[in-house]
Amino acid sequence: MITFQEETLSQSLIEEGEDILKLHSEELSEFSFKLNPDWKVYQQLEDMNTLHIVTARDDDKLIGYYVSIIYTHQHYMGTVVAENDLHYLLPEYRKGWLGYKFLKQVIQFLKERNVDVITHSMTVRHSYLPIVERLGFRLVEYKLIMEV
């Protein structure tokens, strides 16, 4: 049975995330460097109550994660933002409505944390813009990246 739940860093990515993070990096990396999280920084964010993790599980197996960093925006004082940091769902689970349901649950959890704005990033190569627009997201800017 597929479930979505909020988890801590140690419950999800540190304990059992190595394999899924490797797949994530191999599939989506646009650069020569690979995904290599600094767990100490993530732990500090969690200790400050600014790290938010939602996992997707098939029974006990980790099949996806959505990591956000929650903060008060420096440009819009008093506006609480959840900025998407990492998200991934194993390819074999991207069929049907599962990805949509996962994102919908993430949004619900973030609303419960009194977030005002959610930002969501995705690679151009693996865009699913129609799905996130259906959930209420709007494309408002482009983010250009250059490896130097």
Image: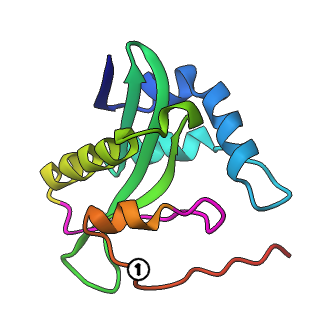
What is the chief secondary structure element of the magenta stretch? Answer: loop
Q: Quadrant of residue 111?
A: bottom left
In this rendering, position of residue 79 left or right of residue 32: left
Would you place residue 35 above or below residue 30 in this image? above
Camera-nearest residue between 87 and 91: 91
Residue 140: give x, y in percent of width and height: 40, 85
Residue 7: give x, y in percent of width and height: 34, 30
Q: Residue at x 62, y 69 (%)?
A: 124
Q: Is residue 42 magenta?
A: no
Would you place residue 11 above or below residue 49 in this image? above
Label 1: how many residues lie within 10 Å, few (<14), some (14-19) or many (20+)?
few
Q: Quadrant of the N terminus?
A: top left
Q: Residue at x 80, y 61 (%)?
A: 31
Residue 128: give x, y in percent of width and height: 48, 61
Would you place residue 37 above or below residue 90 in this image? below
- Is residue 73 among the parts visible in the rendering? yes
Residue 134: give x, y in percent of width and height: 29, 64
Residue numbers of the magenta segment? 115-127
Three-letter residue code for mark 1: Leu
Camera-nearest residue between 10 and 99: 99
- Is residue 48 among the parts visible in the rendering? no
Q: Residue at x 71, y 46 (%)?
A: 27
Residue at the spot of label 1: 139
